[in-house]
Amino acid sequence: MTARRTMTMKTITEINDKERAARVLAALEELYPNAACSLEADGDPWKLLVMARLSAQCTDERVNIISKGLFEAFPTAGKMADGPIEEIEGLIKSCGLYRGKAKSIKETSKIIAEKYACRVPDTMEELLALPGVGRKIANLILGDVYNKGGIVSDTHCMRICGRLGFYPEDKKDPRLTERIMTPLIDKEKQSGFCHRLVLFGRDICTARSPKCRQCPMRDFCLHFEKAALPRAKQ
């Protein structure tokens, strides 16, 4: 880890958002130089789309396990589209909300197979028209598959960006997070930035007990400064 210089609170608050974002990105790239999506889709855009849908209120680790059997039974969008809904439900049952997920991945697979000749569409408008696909999944596909960039506003992204002072920490608004962070991170860096935030959110900036004293961003983190002020006065 490179040495960091200590900053006063005044200096920290004077850093503009673009500079803060650049420092955050540099720290994350140093901490996680080889970050990648934790969903193991083997480079298949359709599988990544399906797995991203399954990941709602389910861990990526669980989705990776479930998906092995799912894709053995239904290896292509066409096969999934023709698959019995009851069989799909049975294969994904342990990931939660399985009935709704089974319905949407079957319908989405049918559209991709018939309308797009098994190619996942590459525009936000077309992706959002697919059943069960919201902006988070669409941005994942646009960034990871098509290198078009996209801020994936998951819980880690919202929490960490809030703590770092980019928007009010008490808000839980994925669309707002995306709107704020998109101009601050260069498009070609957005996908890696989001994957690194996930790793950072699991390792250091956790929801309940963030390891602030070990954090490589504590010298320019407003959350850390606010937390440290009462202790400094004692």
Image (cartoon, rainbow, N blue to C red):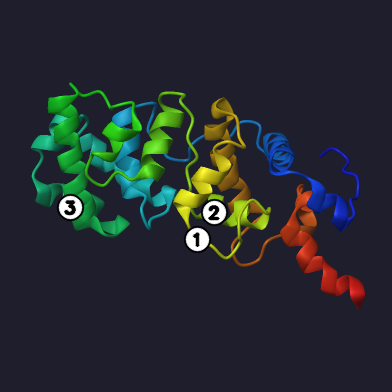
Percent position (x, y) of residue 70? 24, 41
Residue type at mark 1: give it. Answer: Lys
Instruction: Pick the residue in front: 100 or 219.
Output: 219
Q: Which mark is residue 172?
A: 1
Q: Which mark is residue 156?
A: none
Which residue in the structure is indicated by mark 3?
89
Separation (CA) of disc 1 from disc 2:
7 Å
Which residue in the structure is indicated by mark 2?
158
Separation (CA) of disc 3 from disc 1:
31 Å
Secondary structure at badge 2 equals helix
Separation (CA) of disc 3 from disc 2:
31 Å
Does residue 219 show up?
no
Residue at position x 54%, y 54% from top?
Answer: 158
**Would residue 210 appear left or right of 44 to someone viewing this image?**
right
Residues marked 1 and 2 touching at CB (< 8 Å): yes
Instruction: Pick the residue in front: 41 or 153.
Output: 153
The number of numbered badges drawn on the structure is 3
Does residue 179 show up?
yes
Percent position (x, y) of residue 171? 53, 62
Quarter of image, res 78: top left
Percent position (x, y) of residue 54? 31, 48
Residue type at mark 2: give it. Answer: Met
For the N terminus, which image quadrant?
A: top right
Residue 138 lies, with reference to residue 56, above or below; the image says above
Closer to the chain start, of discs 3 and 2, is 3
Instruction: Pick the residue in front: 115 or 37.
Output: 115
